[in-house]
Amino acid sequence: ALAVGSVLAGVISLIWASANYPVFDPWKLFLFTLKFSLPALAIFLYFAVTTLAGNSKSHRDILVVGFMALSGFILLGCGIAGLYNGMGDASAPTGHTALIVDKQIHTSKNSKTYKLIVRSWRPERALEDLPTQSGIYYQVVPGKSQALVYTRYGKLGFEWRVSYRLQN
């Protein structure tokens, strides 16, 4: 039950964090959370194995619980870290003017996703992606339009996007 709960809580917290406190470096946040998620997973698996061992289905049960817990603890670690990074952030929003260099549409079977590619204000990055809506997407002229992007530092040091608006 704890493994299933960790998967559900992980999915919910990750969606909530991504929607409300989108970090610019999700991969770095993921790697950061592994140093907490994996030890917690190891402790959980130790207790799960000692609890489940000793019956004829124990190997199968341990594998099922192990794979569910692996997914759940990783998702939950990322979700909780993303929420803490955003919710615990007391820094003031900082505005960055960024030139829009490209725009892209990603089409799937049932939807379209629009994004703007802007020149980054961060020295370690060349470009940043900004999700947008169709109305804004069609107003933009790459190479001429600019966006004012508001970010916050993040409690854990992972900069996240508060909002943005076009500047003309």
Image: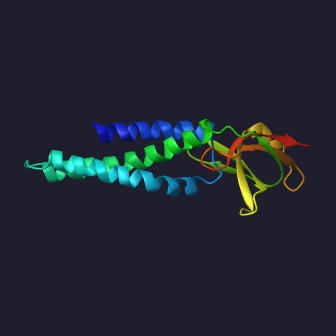
Position of 154 compared to 145: left or right? left
Q: How many labels does the image show?
A: 0
Is residue 98 rendered to the left or right of residue 6?
right
Left or right: residue 68 compared with residue 84: left
Residue under the point 18% across and 51% down: 60
The answer to which of 72 and 145 lies nearer the viewer is 72
Q: Which of 65 and 122 is in front in this view?
A: 122
Asked which quadrant contains residue 83, the reply is top right
Query: In the image, what residue occupies the spot 53% across and 39% down?
Result: 15
Q: The N terminus appears in which quarter of the rendering?
A: top left
Q: Which colour scheme is used?
A: rainbow
Work out whether 120 lies above or below 113: below
Residue 152 image offset from top left, x and y in percent: 71, 43
Residue 88 in view of the camera: yes
Q: Residue 137: which quarter of the image?
A: top right
Does residue 110 show up? no
Residue at 30% from the left image edge and 50% from the top image edge: 43
Quadrant including the C terminus:
top right
The location of residue 67, given as percent across then percent down, is 31, 51
Q: Image check: 4 left or right of 144?
A: left
The quarter of the picture where residue 25 lies is bottom right
Q: Name the residue rendered at 64%, 43% in the picture.
A: 112
Q: Position of residue 97 (x, y in %)?
A: 85, 49
**Residue 41 vs residue 125, the one in the foreground:** 41
